[in-house]
Image: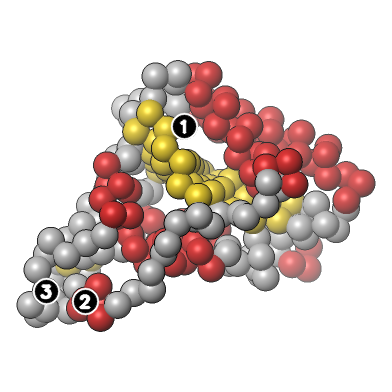
Amino acid sequence: MNVLYITANPKNVDDSYSLRLGEHFLNEYRRLRPHDKIEHVDLFSVDLPPLDKDMLSLWDKHSDIEETHTNPFVEQFIQADRYILVTPLWNMHAPSQVKAYIDQLIVPGKTFQFTETSVEGMLSGKKMIHIQSRGGIYSEGKLKGLESANSYIQTIFSLIGVTDYEHVFIEGTSTYPDEAEDRLKEAKESAKQVAQRFSQDQS
């Protein structure tokens, strides 16, 4: 299997709850599938150009832009079988680099195709896990429903056919700093359980 480990955090691993949780998951996955090829994509270390007119023209069904017009990010993404996406929650959403990366991946004729009435994803049979850190509590209470990053990520990747999707998160690291390490320990246990499912071959 080819696995993309995609991170979106400029901090050092030791200073980031999302990266610490992501590395824990990755190590567990490596233990379960030691022969898989894992490629790291650091979204803070790559050049993510904005959408240009040629890329946008691909969305026009009558475009005269060749279907081969593409970019290295989408080709790398298509070749992978599994995706591990690690993000923090900033200002109730993912870092802007995540959106810029996604804009490179949602390409007609590459990751989805138009039908007469809708669109059809072309990457079915692949798996994704989103590993996320959140400083506040968004799973319940007054902030529940205000976190929009995970719902967006799940929705946009389902558009291109990646519907085998799981979400592991640690939250409350800023609201309850004295509890952060205990919360990380609990999240690591959840990640370990998800890694068991994530490592299994498709039935």
Check disc 1 and report the residue beneath it. 198
**Other-residue count near label 3 (Cα within 10 Å), few / some / many at <14 / 14–19 / ≥20:** few
Q: Earlier in the sequence, mark 1 or mark 3?
A: 3
Nearer the observer, 120 or 180: 180
- Residue 28 vertical position relative to residue 8 in the rendered view, above or below: above
- Going by the numbered disc 2, the residue's amino acid type is Asp
- Residue 114 vertical position relative to residue 179 in the rendered view, above or below: below
Q: Are marks 1 and 2 in contact (CB under 8 Å)?
A: no
- In this rendering, would 20 be left or right of 126? right
Nearer the observer, 95 or 132: 95
- Going by the numbered disc 3, the residue's amino acid type is Ile
Calculate the distance from the C-alpha at mark 1 to the C-alpha at mark 3. 38 Å
Where residue 175 sits, quadrant-wise, is bottom right
Nearer the observer, 17 or 12: 12
- In this rendering, would 59 be left or right of 68? right
Look at the image and tell me in which quarter the C terminus lies.
top left
**Other-residue count near label 2 (Cα within 10 Å), few / some / many at <14 / 14–19 / ≥20:** some
| Residue at screen point 19% across, 73% down | 58
* Secondary structure under the numbered disc 3 in the rendered image: loop
Q: Earlier in the sequence, mark 3 or mark 2?
A: 2
Check disc 2 and report the residue beneath it. 54
Q: Are marks 3 and 2 in contact (CB under 8 Å)?
A: yes
- In this rendering, would 120 be left or right of 88? left
Of the two numbered discs 1 and 2 in the rendering, the one whose residue sits closer to the viewer: 2
- Going by the numbered disc 1, the residue's amino acid type is Phe
**Mark number displayed over residue 154:** none
Check disc 3 and report the residue beneath it. 65
Give residue 37's position: percent from left, percent from top: 38, 28
Give residue 49's position: percent from left, percent from top: 38, 69
- Residue 54 vertical position relative to residue 14 in the rendered view, above or below: below
Q: Is residue 140 visible?
A: no
